Amino acid sequence: MDHQAPGDREGDPGEDGRAEGARRGEEAHKGARGRERVPKKSGSLLRQEPLTQDKYRLMLAERVGCSVSMMARVLGVSRSGSCRWPGAGGGEDPWGALKEAIIAIWEESGRRFGFRKVWSKLMDDDRYAGFAGTTRCRVRKCMSELGIRGICPNASKRTTVPDPDAPERPDLIGRDFSCPVPTAKLVAGIACLRTTGGSSCLAVVIDLCTRMVVGWRLRDNMRAGLVVSAPGMAYSRGYVAGGAIFHSDRGSQYTSAELAAWAAAHDVRLSVGRTGSCHDNAVAESLCA
């Protein structure tokens, strides 16, 4: 087989292409060192400026957690433009001005207002006189599209109302919630539960040794009979020993004569914590909170 001499490779197309590539690369590097922009190289390495609609989509996705004004300032777009950009992207939103007003009211309220209060503000504030004919349904739909909502605090019902005329009772627990044997130390509490049928009151009795709910009753009121029936259930099941301590807060139900009569009849010692101190009955309060 004949071997080609080195001099015969000068006309090789592959060698010419590699030499041309090396020459262009050297020129590009010289230009870069001279602070000249190399379009082909920089276009593939540097991140391009995002489109305006992409910025609007980002603002829409982060609207709940971040301020619209702050995002518009950081991204370099107009706040009104972001409100006019529909969630699907592209085109003009006919409710953009209304959405901008809704966002302004919502942020002024500390992000607490729901659609009812936002609508009421639109109707009453002269600054938004141009939206006088807006319906509450439209405000709710706009807020849903924007992904914002109000804060609805849960309604709480006071369960501990002290009786100023109740006789004094000692605190036999003293925040010592340990017990070596069952049925000797019991704590009690009341919780209000929200159900589909309305509000219900739950009275529970807890054994401090086993931490088990040994008695409970559910009624639609918080009268003394409720807190008497719960330990009565525990007693009927054998979870209340003779001379057991029954500890609770100073609510009028637990300091009532009805509960005192039940305790005397079943050899149970009543104990109460201090007024306004949830720590004196922490085990029951942690369950009923």
Image: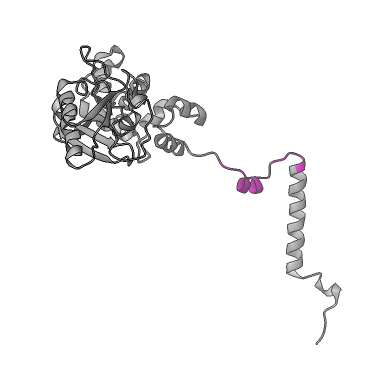
Which segment did they paint magenta? 33-48
Q: Which residue is pictured at 47% across the width and 26% down the height?
A: 70
Quadrant the C terminus occupies: top left
The residue under the point 35% across, 38% down is: 87
Camera-side residue: 100 or 61? Answer: 61
Residue 272 higher or lower than 27, as above or below:
above
Q: Is 117 on the left or on the right of 282, as rendered?
A: left
235 or 34, nearer to the observer: 235
**x then y, percent, for residue 90:** 38, 39
Residue 75: in sight, yes or no? yes
Residue 190 within the magenta-colored segment of the rendering: no
Q: As rendered, which of 243 and 142 lies closer to the eye?
A: 243
The answer to which image quadrant residue 48 occupies is top right
Question: Which of the colour schemes (rainbow, by chain, secondary structure, one colour) is used?
Answer: one colour
Spot occupied by residue 250 in the image (x, y as percentages of width and height): 26, 20
Q: Quadrant of residue 267?
A: top left
